[in-house]
Amino acid sequence: MAKILLVDDERDIVTLIQFLLVKEGHSVRTANNGLEALKSVGIEAGGSAPETPDVIIMDMLMPVMDGHTACKMISEDPVIGKVPVLVMTAKGTAKDVFKDCANVAGYVDKPFAPKSLRDTVAAMIARKPGA
């Protein structure tokens, strides 16, 4: 199915989301912060060979590099910038913070209902050209 990059520093959240999405048949790779995410997609030097995900799920508050900074840098890349980003946050004002990131396709409030997250990701994948 889809290749998903999950970016979050909370191990329990990562485990839950990874379980949910792998169960749906998706391939999920993870990053613990924004800098790791940038390396994962080949934007930041020192990373692995870039593999373009179909969807990026990005937490907002993380150490090293926050989700907004990473999202902004991703949105400026000519290839990876076209990948839709689903922002996860416990802050209700996330939409205002991410208004300069054109690739943000949706928001999920923490805590989230697993079925709601799964359905949101499925809808994002379905909207992707060629899906």
Image (spheres, grey):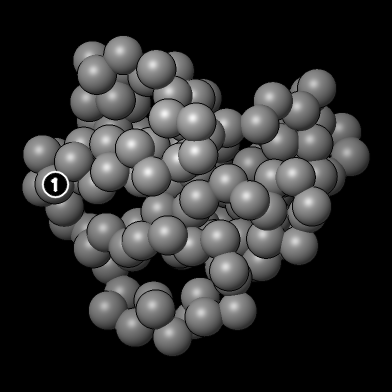
Check disc 1 and give the amino acid type.
Ser
Mark 1 crowdedness (10 Å alpha carbons): few <14, some 14-19, many ≥20: few
Q: Please, which residue is most extreme toward the right here?
A: 45
Quadrant of the snapshot with the C terminus: top left
- On the image, which quarter does residue 67 sit in? bottom right
- What element does badge 1 sit on? helix
Q: Is residue 15 visible?
A: no
Q: Residue at x 51, y 75 (%)?
A: 98
Residue 100 visible in the shown view:
yes
Q: Position of residue 104 (x, y in %)?
A: 48, 63
Q: Residue furthest front?
A: 130
Q: Position of residue 114 (x, y in %)?
A: 14, 40
Q: Look at 48% across and 53% down and name the residue there.
A: 85
Q: Is residue 48 left or right of residue 2?
A: right
Please give left or right for residue 24 compared with residue 124 in the image: left
Say which residue label 1 marks. Answer: 116
Residue 16 as seen in the image, left or right of residue 103: left
